[in-house]
Image: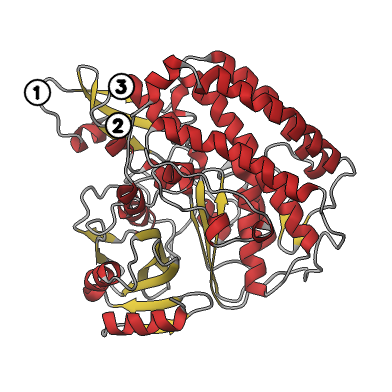
Amino acid sequence: MEEAVINLPLEEEEYIINMGPQHPSTHGVLRLVVSLRGEMVQNVQPHIGYVHRGIEKMCESLTYPQIIHLTDRMDYLSAHINNEAVSLAVEKALGIEVSDRVKYIRTILSELTRIQSHQLFWATYGMDLGGLTCFFYGLRDRELILDIFEETCGGRMIVSYNCPGGLMNDIHPNFQKRIKEFIKYFRKTLPEYDRLLTGNVIFQERVKGLGTINREDAIAWGLTGPVGRASGFSCDIRKHNPYSAYDKVTFREILYDEGDSLHRYKVRMDEMWESMNILEQLVDNIPEGPYAEKMKPVIKLPEGEYWQSVETARGELGVYIVSDGNKNPFRMKFRSPNFVNLAPLNLLAKGFKIADLVAINGSLDLVIPDIDR
Amino acid sequence: MDNTQLAAAAAALAPASEIVQGKQFVEISVSPGHLLSTATALKENTETRFDMLVCITGMDWGKELGVVYHLRSTEHNHMVVLKTRVSDRENPEIDSLCPLWPAADFHEREVYDLLGIKFRGHPDLRRLFLDSTWGYPLRKDYKDDINILAR
């Protein structure tokens, strides 16, 4: 508390409250020190580091196949995509081209990951704003995807299915059947989400025009993912620098110009439709081939620096590996999307009521372990 | 622009820098004194237009500390790497890039927290993850008594 007071110059009639680190609406251990006048937010100071595990430091004493398992624990809702980022970086460094089968399966799983992440966003955002039913509906449908993961990857959330050179195992025989069943089911269920929350007048009035950020600011702050795209910033890595099988599918990049909480929400809703389109283009066309390339038992990257960006459910995840030729990286850096998206919270929430801060914070869809790493 | 054009443009904009072609990107190394002017030139020039700061990475190269900036142009969709090094390990100081990109705010605080590099002109330079009793864990000479893996 002492530290917070020093950094928040208080004016007359202002006072400070602590939101978190154990507050349900912060979705984890994020502490927001808010200075208020009445119930109007004057200043928000995020305090982070409660789940800092020093993943970047740990990477320096681990081998590349081991690092894969740490990346799951950053953004646990995009676990598969995080694995993919490190795998792609290592493959790029070694000059390995994986088979089309691996590319297709990786893309399918990435899109499933994106859908389940957005489902959880929808569920918790509804709950943040007082619609508890959303939480049950969202988690009910998310289970179906987690079941697909469980069958093929072995894990439900923390999958660790990618590895440098391909995949840990081949897919389960039920894989395609289950996905087609899911798409059929979810195409019917997703309009229900709109009827329940998107079209709800109370919800619309609550979040419209809340926490607006324009395109120039979004670029200057480096906002990516649905947060950036809601402001009209075209930042989809899948479109601009395609990886895996994204160059083989057609899909639309969802863009809105308004940049408020409602449109951050809408981007995610539309992205679920787009993800289903991508899945349908791929699921019947998985080519035959090996599920993993033959790798040396000890993976050593040639000396140099490697960068790989991927599009997680929350934005651009960058992996920066500096190798000195050993089996451990010399330095490993993760450019996590949540860390960057949290930074302008003060700008977004200033001048709104404290209850709106919850809605704005929810619309950023933060995963705290990814911020702290 | 492709990498050869970028290297030529960078050489024209930052004559005091050392430019090498890395594995993927053009890498521009400048002394800390030239960092702010080079970054401004790269951002303002209409042909390069690096309007997005993607990432800041603090580095410990042993004798020297340094900072690596990944810059992207959203208009031209190209990327470049900007590097700077300081040899003073006791009191390393580099200009802050917050006036150019507000995104630098949190990134620089992270670098300060984990490597102890100070940023001149940063609006609110405090430790981000750790409290003030910790050392600087990403430095190579950091003694780690807790981590089981390192032992």
Asked whether the residues under marks 2 and 1 belong to the same chain, the reply is: yes
Asked whether the residues under marks 1 and 3 belong to the same chain, the reply is: yes
Q: How many angstroms separate mark 1 from mark 3 (CA)? A: 18 Å
Amino acid tagged 2: Ala
Which chain is disc 3 placed on? A
Q: Is residue B86 shown above or below B95?
A: below
How many numbered marks does the figure carry? Answer: 3
Q: Residue A163, percent across and down?
A: 72, 57
Crowding near the residue tagged with mark 1, few <14, some 14–19, many ≥20 C-alpha atoms within 10 Å? few
Is residue B5 visible from the viewing direction of this image?
A: yes
Element on which disc 1 rests: loop
User: Looking at the image, is mark 2 or mark 1 nearer the viewer?
Assistant: 2
| Location of residue A44 (image quadrant) | top left
The residue positioned 62% from the left and 73% from the top of the image is A326
Question: Which circle's residue, 2 or 3, is located before the other in the chain?
Answer: 2
Point out which mark residue A321 bears: none
The residue positioned 44% from the left and 28% from the top of the image is A26
Amino acid tagged 1: Glu
Q: Which residue is mark 3?
A: A354
Crowding near the residue tagged with mark 2, few <14, some 14–19, many ≥20 C-alpha atoms within 10 Å? many
Element on which disc 3 rests: helix
Q: Residue A338, percent across and down?
A: 46, 44
The residue positioned 82% from the left and 39% from the top of the image is A151
Question: Which circle's residue, 2 or 1, is located before the other in the chain?
Answer: 1
Q: How many angstroms separate mark 2 from mark 1 (CA)? A: 20 Å
Q: How many angstroms separate mark 2 from mark 3 (CA)? A: 9 Å
Q: Which residue is mark 1?
A: A12
Is residue B91 visible from the viewing direction of this image?
A: no
- Quadrant assignment for the N terminus of chain B: bottom left
Element on which disc 2 rests: helix
Q: Which residue is mark 2?
A: A349
